Image (cartoon, rainbow, N blue to C red):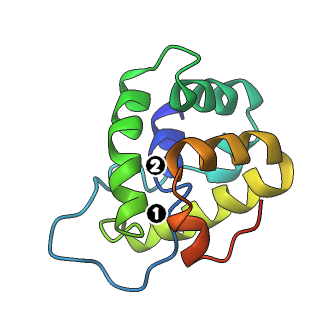
Amino acid sequence: MKATLAILVMCVLASLATAAAGDKKYTEKFDNVNVDEVLGNTRILNAYIKCLMGTGSCSPEGRELKKLLPDALQTDCSKCSDVQRRNSNKVINFLRNNKAGEWKLLLDKYDANGAYRARHNIKN
């Protein structure tokens, strides 16, 4: 379950881009996990947020997420599978609606120059 959230959150700030750039993709080994179940576990979700923010320890999946998130943002998740894009949208909506403070902190850290927000017309 932890690994699934890591992959889902990997694209948290990434858009639902329509085409993949090149043949290289992120791993799809976590695509069959129940996203709703993962988002319903506050303890796990908060652990990943702390990992991403640098205020908590990271699991191996969290470290991978932290490494890939900047690329996912820069490329609008172009290396994500269709399932990852759908799940990312679900995660983004969940964070925006239920964890607005944490969502803003993640945006501020991983989109410091506001490029992602500008591309996707996101207001703070």
Foreground pick, 89 / 123: 123
Foreground pick, 65 / 74: 74
The furthest residue to the front: 113
**Label 1 is placed on what type of residue?**
Gln
Q: Residue at x 73, y 62 (%)?
A: 93
Foreground pick, 116 / 36: 116
State whether residue 99 appears in this view. no
Q: Residues within 10 Å of mark 2 (few under 14, many from 20)?
A: many
Q: Give residue 44's position: percent from left, percent from top.
A: 64, 27
Name the quadrant of the C terminus: bottom right
Q: Viewed as shown, does residue 26 lie left or right of 33?
A: left
- Seen in the picture, residue 107 relative to 51 is either above or below; the reply is below
The image quadrant that residue 78 belongs to is bottom left
Q: Residue at x 67, y 77 (%)?
A: 121
Disc 1 vs disc 2: Cβ atoms closer than 8 Å? yes
Provide the secondary structure element on which disc 1 rests.
Answer: helix
Mark 1 and mark 2 lie on one chain; the one further toward the N terminus is 2
Q: Which residue is mark 1?
A: 84
Q: Viewed as shown, does residue 22 lie left or right of 83?
A: left
State whether residue 78 appears in this view. yes
Name the quadrant of the N terminus: top right
Q: Which residue is mark 2?
A: 10
Q: Give residue 88's position: percent from left, percent from top.
A: 56, 61
